[in-house]
Amino acid sequence: MKVFRLDRLDAERAAQNGAYLRFLKEGTMSAGLYALAPGETDTQGAHQQDELYQVISGRASLTVGDETCTVGRGSVVFVPAGVPHRFHHITEELRVLVVFSPPEA
């Protein structure tokens, strides 16, 4: 069993001066913590893996393909492999648990 604390993961991510921290990589999946501040630009594009987002805190718009929705704490969003997507109009510090399947490279 592996147990992670979000506050410790976020501190590690911040110490590395990055928006994303991958903290788990297994045979069929990987997981990370993604963070963006209000006004920050999300530069990600389409991934080769299916992706699941769970918003831990914050508020933003998320565009996946041609669809846009508002996400906030408690939102869970599935993004199919190969579909362009990005967070934007971030109004509150955003923290997102990200799960990739199969694992990201």
Image: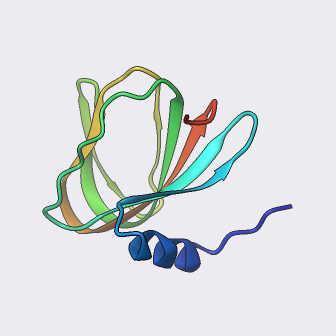
Of residues 80 and 26, which is closer to you in this image?
26
In screen coordinates, is 62 left or right of 15? left
Of residues 13 and 5, which is closer to you in this image?
13
Question: Is 3 drawn above or below residue 77 in the view shown?
Answer: below
In screen coordinates, is 10 left or right of 72? right
In screen coordinates, is 29 left or right of 17? right
Q: Quadrant of the C terminus?
A: top right
Of residues 72 and 94, which is closer to you in this image?
94
Residue lying at the far front in this picture: please name it.
Answer: 16
Question: Is 70 drawn above or below residue 45 in the view shown?
Answer: below
On the image, the x and y values in percent for residue 81 come to 47, 23
To which quarter of the image does residue 28 belong? top right
On the image, the x and y values in percent for residue 76 come to 49, 48
On the image, the x and y values in percent for residue 99 come to 57, 45
Of residues 105 and 103, which is closer to you in this image?
105
Residue visible at 63% across and 30% down in the picture: 102
On the image, the x and y values in percent for residue 22 come to 54, 54
